[in-house]
Image (tube, helix red, strand yellow):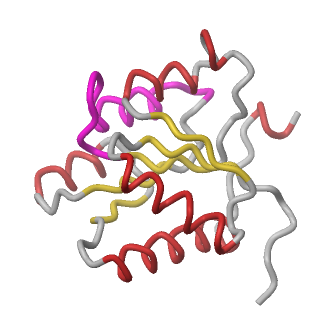
Amino acid sequence: MEQSDRLIHFLLVEDDDRHAKLVIRCLDQHRIGNSVDRVADGEQALTYLRKEGEYAKARRPDVILLDLNLPKVDGLEVLKTIKADESLALIPVVMLTTSQQESDRLKAYKLNVNSYIVKPVDFEKFLQMVSDCSFYWGVWNQPAQSPETSA
């Protein structure tokens, strides 16, 4: 299999340290993402994406891995804000959540999430899910060019 030559930068928005470490480890292990930044709540995610404060020099992510249940600003509100902002709307957002609620999934898709994935409880399945997800978004997906990335 041939890997894409482009460098992929993921933004992981995850409040659970254990889940975050697993995702980052899996991305590193499979060398899909060339870099990963992590923030632990929705407020930090929005600050990062707006390049404010300590994130003034933050790199624009190619893919956002977004937890649903976040402190300060929940994942659906973060998603809504991203998709309403013309400068951010084209960044693919993958909702990674433990919620299997139909209502949560419908809300996310109505807010234009690009993918909704329920985190498996089983450790090996969790690692496989992260690997598959990162491989898809990092290798197979052909992203839209935003004005910021095409300049």
What residue sits 34% from the left and 40% below the top? 15
What residue sits 59% from the left and 72% below the top? 136
Count of labels in the image: 0
Left or right for 55, reference 77: right
On-image quarter of the C terminus:
top right
Quick one: 30 or 151, which is closer to the camera?
Answer: 30
Return the x and y of residue 146 as percentages of the image width and height: 72, 39
Region in magenta = 67-87
What residue sits 51% from the left and 25% below the top? 85
On-image quarter of the N terminus:
bottom right
Relative to residue 29, is residue 110 depicted above or below? above
Return the x and y of residue 109 as percentages of the image width and height: 30, 52
What residue sits 48% from the left and 49% below the top? 93
- Determine which quarter of the picture holds residue 79: top left
Left or right for 133, reference 3: left
Q: Residue furthest top?
A: 53
Relative to residue 13, is residue 125 depicted above or below? below
Quick one: 20 or 148, which is closer to the camera?
Answer: 20
Return the x and y of residue 59 as percentages of the image width and height: 72, 33
Q: Residue furthest bottom?
A: 1
Q: Is residue 69 magenta?
A: yes
- Determine which quarter of the picture holds residue 27: bottom right
Relative to residue 72, is residue 36 depicted above or below? below
Return the x and y of residue 31 as percentages of the image width and height: 71, 69
Q: Is residue 37 magenta?
A: no
Quick one: 91 or 52, which is closer to the camera?
Answer: 52
